Image (cartoon, coloured by chain):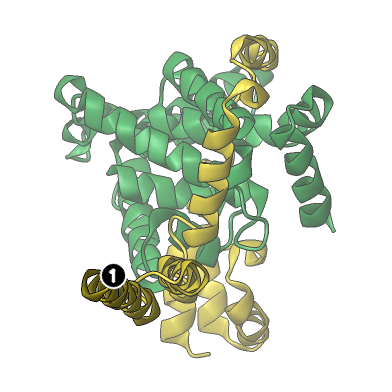
Chain colours: A green, B yellow
Amino acid sequence: MVQKSEAALVKLVERKNQAAFKKLLDIHLSGINRYTVRMIGNATNAEDITQEVFLRLWTRAESYKPESSKLSTWLHNIAHNLCIDYFRKNNRFVQDPSENYQSDDSPLVASMSAHTNSAATSGGAEPDQELAKSTQQRDVKQALMALPERQRSAIIMCHYQGISNKDAAHIMEISVDALESLLSRGRLKLRKLLTEDGKS
Amino acid sequence: MNIQRFKKLIEAYGTESERWPEADRHAALIFLDSNLDANEVIKEMRSLDEALDADLVTQPTNLKVDILSQISMTPNHSARKHGDDLFAKLWHWLRPYVNGPFIIWRPAIAACFPLLAGIYLGTVMDIGSEDHLLEWEEDVYVMGLISENEEQE
């Protein structure tokens, strides 16, 4: 039902109907932006990519085929490809963050331990909780950015974006088995980064 | 479902059942209800999902406005040449999905069009027909006879 009405809205966008475009923007903007921010790790560049995704919806709406995929999957496909292009273009200037998280003495693990210890001893005072929460958020962001792009993309799609394994595999142009392998390896690495010994 | 598959499922998709693949979800939930080891796996892995869920992304306030102002600046698609539209439509008909299955009968039909057009033109215009040659030869022959008779007279 949703897919049908979205397909009708896309048809209107093909005819340059701004109201239909606004409606689709309301539905999909935050989701696509969450995906690009988590993929790129830099809000400004992620916003540029999000803008490009919706510009393509505006200029190339006719290439969306509702019988082939959901609109959300189609937009994620564009966002994923733009993120990969971004990484290719900026490869020379991006330092591999995983180098920072090789050992258990890394700042990430240390801060995670400190957070766990302080939460246990402080009795959960509110400012401490806020601090711990923001520290944990920062750590998760860093850990995600430490993953290889494909593992990160798989985890973001399946964990945060609620995309089915088949759709995620289609977007990444891999088999469902290969996607599962990426997810497992990615999550294992995240556990290692976010806990002292990989066992939470 | 067995413990190996259940463990693989949790390692890939996490502990929340709504993130599990639809094909496995029902069997995995039944297995979880009846197996203590499966519950242990969930306990062991839950903290990663909790940590991931703590990461929130705030929505930039001006992004929607920026996109709307950008699209108002893009040249109107309808102002493009009609020929471009036709070509794009034809191309999409021939090759419908970029990453999807290739439909062979469409380009095959397209390839038949020049052949059919050639047959049609050949029939209508009567190109290469031997009748024309015969008529011309007959004309020359008759003219030859006439000039011969005139000479004899």
| Percent of width and height locating residue B144 | 25, 73
Image side of residue A3 versus residue A62, left or right: right
Residue at figure coordinates x 34%, y 34% from the top left: A145
Q: Specify whether residue B64 is in view.
A: yes
Q: Which of A194 and B111 is in front in this view?
A: B111
Where the C terminus of chain A falls, by quadrant? bottom left
Q: Which of A190 and A71 is in front in this view?
A: A71
Label tally: 1
Residue B69's place in the image compared with B80, above or below, is above
| Percent of width and height locating residue B60 | 63, 15
Residue at figure coordinates x 48%, y 66% from the top left: B125
Give the residue pinned by disc 1: B150
Dividing the picture into quadrants, the one containing residue B148 is bottom left
Residue at figure coordinates x 43%, y 31% from the top left: A141
The chain identifier of the residue carrying mark 1 reads B
Dividing the picture into quadrants, the one containing residue A61 is top right
| Percent of width and height locating residue B143 | 31, 70
Tag 1 secondary structure: helix
Residue A156's place in the image compared with A43, above or below, is below
At label 1, the amino acid type is Glu
Image side of residue A138 versus residue B53, left or right: left
Q: Specify whether residue B49 is in view.
A: no
